[in-house]
Image: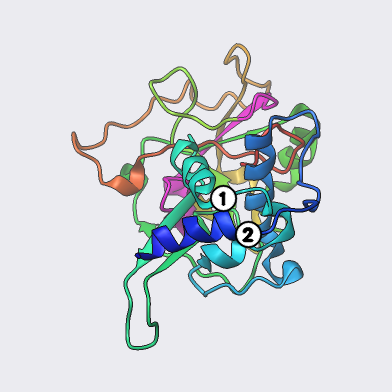
Amino acid sequence: MDVTDQLKQADKNRKKGPSQKLRGNPRDEPRIRISKSLSWLLRHGAKTAGLNMREDGYAEVSQVLSNPMFRDVNFSQLQEIVTRDQKQRYHLLLESRSPDSPSDIWWIRANQGHSLKMVTLDMQPITSALDIPLAVHGTSLASWGFIATQGLSKMKRNHIHLAQGIPGDNVISGMRNSSQILIFVDVQKALDAGIPFYLSANGVVLTEGDEGFLSPTYFQRVEFAKDRSPVAGWEGSGPIVPRELPAQPSQSVQGLAVAEVYSSASEPS
């Protein structure tokens, strides 16, 4: 019996009982609440929940499913959530047996969005703005007032999140419906100033900024998301035109997603 069959057999043998309350709005469908709970556990709550996690962010699937929140979730359901996730938030890894492990092991991680300081993701450095079509951050009107003066903040996360595209441009975008403001970042200007940028495994542009902030100095243009009209004083040189990338971009620049500073959206970013 291989490790996948073992996990499925464990699902059948597992004693059912009251589940610890899932995160999210009780009115959300179960899939969304499970994904929110998984996102919290793998990005922020591993230490609190007593979940062992490797430095690369992977945790054993068997340990994740043993968490009381996922008492009613089996391995097949977890696979489906990972596969169907449009933002490609998670990655399942089957690691073959080794001298240190008598059997194969399934691992899972969140591809980005961590606040856990011990996690070091395998990110691809961006060396030029030409590496990506553009970089944009979606946020709310309420947050914009602070961002316009202080800049984008990584807050409790390890990085500020930016996307490579916006909805409507043949981009699979994870922008939350609550996003009202689009902030286009001049990546080259920031790179020239010594601020590093990276690509996550699911194509999100990440930066730590300067001491946790990306200054408004690097905002190229700011628009209202609804009609794409410019915010007064932030027109820049005009609408941002996505850069042309090679005909066959690497996998790391696919799976585009738009991130937003923490908000009460229907799904985790």
Q: Amino acid at mark 1?
A: Asn
* Closer to the eye: label 1 or 2: 2
* Up-down relation of residue 89 to residue 106 (above or below): above
Q: Report if residue 173 lies within the magenta region.
A: no
Q: Is residue 66 left or right of residue 132?
A: right
Q: Is residue 201 magenta?
A: yes
Callout 2: 10 Å neighbours few (<14), some, many (20+)?
A: few
Residue 38 position (above or below residue 257): below
The residue positioned 51% from the left and 52% from the top of the image is 75
Q: Residue 114 appears at what percent x and percent y? A: 61, 59
In this figure, which residue is indicated by the disc labeled 2?
14
Q: Is residue 8 left or right of residue 19?
A: left
Dot 1 and dot 2 residues touching (CB under 8 Å) = yes
Name the residue rendered at 62%, 20% in the picture.
225
* Quadrant of the snapshot with the N terminus: bottom left
Mark 1 vs 2, N-terminal side? 2
Residue at x-position 67% and y-position 53%:
70
What's under tag 2, amino acid-wise?
Answer: Arg
Q: Which segment is the magenta one? A: 176-205
Residue 193 visible, this angle: no
Percent of width and height locating residue 79: 47, 47
Q: Which of the 4 image quarters holds residue 147?
A: top right
Residue 64 screen position, x and y as percent: 60, 62
Q: Secondary structure at mark 1?
A: loop
- Which quadrant holds residue 95? bottom left
Q: Which residue bears the numbered disc 1?
A: 74
